[in-house]
Amino acid sequence: EDKVVQSPLSLVVHEGDTVTLNCSYEVTNFRSLLWYKQEKKAPTFLFMLTSSGIEKKSGRLSSILDKKELFSILNITATQTGDSAVYLCAVLSGGSNYKLTFGKGTLLTVNP
Amino acid sequence: NAGVMQNPRHLVRRRGQEARLRCSPMKGHSHVYWYRQLPEEGLKFMVYLQKENIIDESGMPKERFSAEFPKEGPSILRIQQVVRGDSAAYFCASSPFSGGTDTQYFGPGTRLTVL
């Protein structure tokens, strides 16, 4: 069975800190890895990573994929209270080109 | 362009009742996916539908659960004779194409509580 494991499960930081969220996976026929931000509503798409070693960046957020070691990291620099959310990692894999397998998420709390 | 709409946002049912959850995909999207998030768990795939077709229901419980996506109107996830274990957040996502490099856009979810 495909597996996606995120760590840490929760994290508390102060505004201005930099955080790194981890996602490791064991799946059959990896296709791509996606990061979502989930506040008290819809998970919103952040990044999709398909190739190893290519960093994707959006403002203070960046992410990179290592297909050899089967993991991805999501970095957030200069954190703000608005970054507080659950960050979800999901993998698209196998014979299906639509069935996402999600990790349990990392709950990030940014205190002022 | 409105996002994926789900209603109701919160639904309370007593054991044995039926729950109907609705999902309207983004405009121009004809692919709908339902996921369930149990407490302390990640989202898990339930079913993938296109208009008038169930493509993959491998994640659906074998009994009491059904889904449809009619030619007109929203997609419906129906749970008959609900039990306490059905309490969860149910998310719908839509995409313009089937998987590949396209992302799925999620709705805000329906939080079902079974008393």
Image (tube, coloured by chain):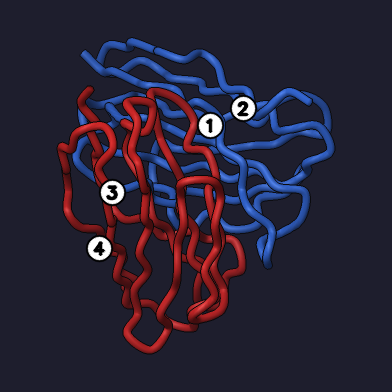
Amino acid identity at mark 1: Leu
Image coordinates of residue A111 in percent, x first then y, are: 20, 26
Residue A66 sits above or below residue A74 on the image: below
Label 2: element kind: strand
Q: Residues within 10 Å of mark 1 (few under 14, many from 20)?
A: some
Label 3: chain letter: A
Label 4: element kind: strand
Same chain for labels 1 and 3? Say yes or no.
Answer: no
Q: Is B63 left, or right, of A55 in this rendering?
A: left
Amino acid identity at mark 3: Thr
Same chain for labels 1 and 4? Say yes or no.
Answer: no
Tint applied to chain A in the drawing: red
Q: Identify residue for label 2.
A: B23
Instruction: Work out whether mark 2 precedes mark 1 in sequence or the reverse, and give the earlier one.
Output: 2
Viewer-proximal residue among B58 and A35: A35
Q: Quadrant of the C terminus of chain B?
A: top left
Q: Residues within 10 Å of mark 2 (few under 14, many from 20)?
A: many
Q: Which mark is residue B112?
A: none
- Give the Cα distance between marks 2 and 1: 8 Å
- Give the Cα distance between marks 1 and 3: 41 Å
- Give the Cα distance between marks 3 and 4: 21 Å
Q: Which residue occupies 60% across, 51% down?
A: B48
Q: Identify residue for label 4.
A: A5
Residue B81 sits above or below residue B105 on the image: above
- Nearer to us of marks 2 and 3 is 3
- Nearer to us of marks 2 and 1 is 2
Amino acid identity at mark 2: Cys
Q: Identify residue for label 1.
A: B77
| In contact (CB < 8 Å): disc 3 and disc 4 | no
Q: Identify residue for label 3.
A: A18
Tint applied to chain B in the drawing: blue
Image coordinates of residue B67 in percent, x first then y, are: 57, 38
